[in-house]
Image (cartoon, rainbow, N blue to C red):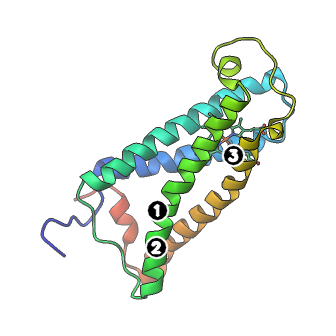
Amino acid sequence: MSKNTPSRYHPLQVGLHWLVVLLIFSAFVLGKIMSQLPNEPAKITLLAIHMTLGIVTLLAVIVRFIARFRLPQPAHATTGNAFLDWLGKLVHYGLYVFVFLMAVSGISLSMQAGLMPVVFGGSGAPLPADFFDFTARMLHGFVAPALLLLVVVHAGAALYHQFVLKDNLLARMWHGN
Ligand code: HEM
């Protein structure tokens, strides 16, 4: 390891990582709840919260992606198995791509369905009868389980490092000396 390679992530990356975890979890749960509800006016507040969480997630992920190339990073974790190490890198990039797709498909949906003035502008217009009338709703619904799968693999790998390989990997994504 070069002397410029830190042993843990920069505090900005650590903060953004856990913020994005919280945002995605909240947007996901709220999205699932909303998709069970009829498109009545009472749903507008939930939509406003969900859409805000999703847009903030997109901004946080863009800042993280830029910071990734600007800040010194710890060396890529190794399991001792070349295939698993390659898979780890692939999942990391996949997470960026799928969070991006999730947010962009949500924004496309809100544009196709004319949601912005209804949700944030108080236009008083009714919500569309069914979001599935819009193609972006299908995409949003397909990307959601794919993102969930990547998150499960990613979290599972972190726990595997922490508790099976016992390399204390989680400390890299936390604050300390
Ligand atoms: C990373 C961010 C996001 C996540 C994790 C997320 C998650 C979800 C999930 C899980 C659903 C339900 C999907 C299903 O069961 O088929 C959903 C629905 C929805 N999302 Fe998102 N979303 C995100 C971003 C956004 C954004 C940025 C917008 C708009 C600006 C948006 C607007 C919507 C709308 C309008 C629905 C449909 C609700 C319904 O069917 O009643 N989402 N979202």
Q: Nearer the viewer, mark 1 or mark 2?
A: 1
Placement of 36 over or under 112, stated as above or below: below
Q: Which amino acid type is shown beneath numbered disc 1?
A: Tyr
- Viewer-proximal residue, 175 or 4? 4
Q: Where residue 29 is drawn, which disc sits there?
A: 3
Quadrant of res 137: top right
Residue 134 visible in the picture: yes
Sort mark 1 into few (<14), some (14-19) or many (20+) by Cα contacts within 10 Å: few
Estimate the x, y position of residue 162 in percent, counting from the top left. 44, 74
**Residue at screen point 34% across, 51% down:** 13
Tag 3, which secondary structure? helix
Does the residue tagged 2 have its C-beta within 8 Å of any atom of ligand 1? no
Cα separation, mark 3 vs mark 2, equals 26 Å
Residue 9 vs residue 97: left or right? left
Does the residue tagged 3 have its C-beta within 8 Å of any atom of ligand 1? yes
Residue extending furthest left?
3
Sort mark 3 into few (<14), some (14-19) or many (20+) by Cα contacts within 10 Å: few
Sort mark 2 into few (<14), some (14-19) or many (20+) by Cα contacts within 10 Å: many
Estimate the x, y position of residue 34 in percent, counting from the top left. 77, 38
Cα separation, mark 1 vs mark 3, equals 23 Å
Q: Which of disc 2 and disc 3 is earlier in sequence? A: 3
**Residue at screen point 53% across, 46% down:** 22
Q: Nearer the viewer, mark 1 or mark 3?
A: 1
Placement of 99 over or under 129, stated as above or below: below
Q: Which residue is mark 1?
A: 93
Q: Where residue 88 is drawn, which disc sits there?
A: 2
